[in-house]
Each structure stands twice: as structure tokens, then as C-alpha cells.
Image (cartoon, rainbow, N blue to C red):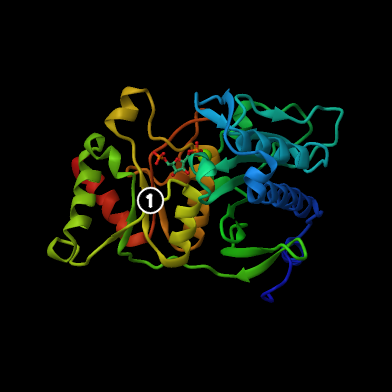
Amino acid sequence: MRIGTTLTNYIIENQRDVQGATGEFTGLLNDIVVACKKIADVVNKGDLVNVLGSAESENVQGETQKKLDVISNELMIDALQHNGHIAGLASEEMEAFFSVPLHKPSGNYLLLVDPLDGSSNIDVNVSVGTIFSILRAPEGRRAIELADFLRPGAEQVAAGYCLYGPSSLLVLTTGNGVSMFTLDRDIGEFLLTREGVRIPEETREFAINASNQRFWEAPVQRFIQECLQGSEGPFGKDFNMRWVASMVAEVHRILTRGGVFLYPSDRRLAAAGKNGKLRLLYEANPMALIVEQAGGAASTGLERILDLQPEELHQRVPVILGSRVEVERLVAYHAEVG
Ligand code: AHM
Ligand code: MG
């Protein structure tokens, strides 16, 4: 497709290739885009409109919410709840999912969203982002149930994220490769800037929160130790390290120049009853689909993320994703210890 085409046109043109398409999916993506533009605007204005700092509330994960977490969640719901493109919505910021009331216009899709990922970066003006995952709603009009959201990531119809950085970028996959759109603030549109994004097969860059090192399990200890040994170790190459503490920025770097990102489970998280930090349904699954669609890999270390059968709405999962060779190496190290 032509570089510079608007995201709306891009979706409409792609829709023509889908037999029986009704335009509802196009409408849904447009709703998400509207929410992302509004979030981009408020993130960009920051202190000017008094949106930095804590909201003095906690979300379902027991984490303190930032004002922008709450605002982004509201903007997402506002953009979606009345348009008839979704039957239900689940968010990191809401304990319970939202089911469109039976007397209101409803659609054939379910949306799972982390409205503003990387909250710890908000107040220090480092990149944050919105992550979304789209599933098909069950056939027929009925109230949405929890089980409707608990689908393996391989069943996602589409996934994407919007990165609020020096530029605002929307990255999207509908299961047919990965495309990137950059927000042109002068005209208020996301314009296609890259298509057919591919992650380099191998990398010399890793991302992990090294402050947790003493809690890591053996395969992760071994892998990072070998990265640090560089050209003197078994990998025979020197590594660079990055940690933005914003998964959206991390995945975006990996899509741009390769790399491997790890948020493993560890003894500290396990002792708190958590299997990893990141959430399966609205963080790991959409990012795994994007990464795989760009030729990379995404695993817990033991299983492909997209094959996991979710058990809870806010379930956590260990995440290893990025350049295929390094992810496979880590998976092999996990297999060795059984
Ligand atoms: P959040 O959804 O509460 O923002 O948490 C998810 C974020 C990820 O973006 C990032 O990879 C990770 O948490 C950073 O964790 P840490 O603070 O341990 O570095
Ligand atoms: Mg998050």
C-alpha cells in the first residue's frame, strides 16, 4: 500500500479483500484510533493540563494508578461503548470486564486493552503506550461471560499498540504482517510509514530489569551471564543492554532493530503468588502476535505464548520475546533444566 496513506484508508482497502466484511471491524479500529489520538494529546500536554502524578487509587493488581492511567481508560471506554462495534471490553484498569447491555447496539468483537502501559515512566516524560488485542465475540446476541475473553492468543483477530514517544506511532497486525503508522499532528491522522516490518533473526541487544537478578531462575541466569561474557563467551559476540521499563517502547525497539526482551518469573514474584509480572490477555498476547507476525518469537520459556489457554482475566505470565535465534536459545536452556 502507498506510504503516506491514512490508517482509515488502509483499513478500508484491506477490508475489501475480506469476503462478507461489513465494515464493523473498520469501525472498531477507527474507535481505537480516536481513543489513541486523544490519549496521545493528553500525554503530550502532561503537566500543562495537570494530568501527571498519582490518582490516589489502586487497580485490581494492587498497583497505584496514575491520573493518566485512569484518564486513558476512560477515553478508551468513551470511544468504544456506544458505537456498536464491540460486545465487551476488558482493561488492566478494571477488575471486571464490561459487557455491552443487551438493549444497546453491540458488535462482533471483544477488546482487551492496557490503556497506558509503562505507568512508571509517565511522570519522568519517558515513552508510554496503549496495547490492544481484538477477539471475535461469541455468535448470537447474549450477555458476555468471562469465558468469552479466555481465548488463546492465536485466536486474536488483530493486535496493536500505540507508542507515545517523540512521535506517536500506531503499530498494527491483522494477522497478515505488521504495519506502522505515524501520527501527523498537523492533520490529525495516522499515516502509513512502514509496512512488512521484520525483526532481525539474531541480535546483540537484550532487555531485562537487572535489579531482579538474584531472584532469577537458572535458565535466565545462564542466558544473561553468557550475554555479559560477550565475545569471550559461548555466543561469541558482544551485547548491548537496554531497559526502558515500558514494554511498548521495548517491543518497538525490537521491531525496529532486533533484540530480546525478558520479563521472567522469579523467586520474588513467585513468593508473592505471581507467575511473572506482565498480563497475558492485554500485554503478552498482543505483543506476541505482533512479534510473530514480524518473524520473531514469543515464549514463556516453556511454551509459546499464543498457545496458552488463559484461566483468568488478569493472569500474569513470564515473557521472553524478540529475535528468533536468542528466544529459541533461552527456550532450549529452559528445556535442559526440565
Ligand atoms: P504496567 O502495566 O503497570 O505499566 O506494568 C508493565 C510494565 C511494562 O511496560 C514494563 O516492561 C515493566 O512493567 C517494567 O517493570 P519494572 O518496573 O520491574 O522495570
Ligand atoms: Mg501494562
Residue indicated by mark 1: 243
Looking at this view, name the residue that lies furthest to the front: 48
Q: In this rendering, does residue 313 appear at all?
A: no
Looking at this view, name the residue that lies furthest to the bottom: 2
Disc 1 under 8 Å from ligand 1? The reply is yes
Which residue occupies the foreground of this view, 325 or 120? Answer: 120
Q: Residue at x 21, y 67 (%)?
A: 237
The location of residue 314, given as percent across then percent down, is 52, 30
Would you call the spot at circle 1 few (<14 residues within 10 Å), some (14-19), or many (20 or more)?
some
The location of residue 167, given as percent across then percent down, is 60, 61
Left or right of residue 206, residue 77 in this image: right
Q: Residue at x 60, y 64 (%)?
A: 180
Looking at this view, name the residue that lies furthest to the left: 232
Q: In this rendering, does residue 79 appear at all?
A: yes
Q: Residue at x 38, y 35 (%)?
A: 276
The location of residue 230, given as percent across then percent down, is 19, 62
- In this rendering, the answer to whether 98 lies above or below 196 is above
Q: In the picture, residue 109 is in which quadrant?
A: top right
Q: In the picture, residue 192 is in which quadrant?
A: bottom right
Left or right of residue 197, residue 23 in this image: right
Left or right of residue 173, residue 242 in this image: left
Q: Disc 1 marks which amino acid?
A: Trp
Quarter of the picture holding the C terminus: top left
Dot 1 lies on which element? Answer: loop
The location of residue 277, given as percent across then percent down, is 41, 35
Quarter of the picture holding the N terminus: bottom right
Left or right of residue 224, residue 310 in this image: right
The image shows a total of numbered marks equal to 1
Which residue occupies the foreground of this view, 85 or 122? Answer: 122
Which residue occupies the foreground of this view, 148 or 290? Answer: 290
Q: Quadrant of ligand 1?
A: top left
Q: Residue at x 46, y 44 (%)?
A: 307
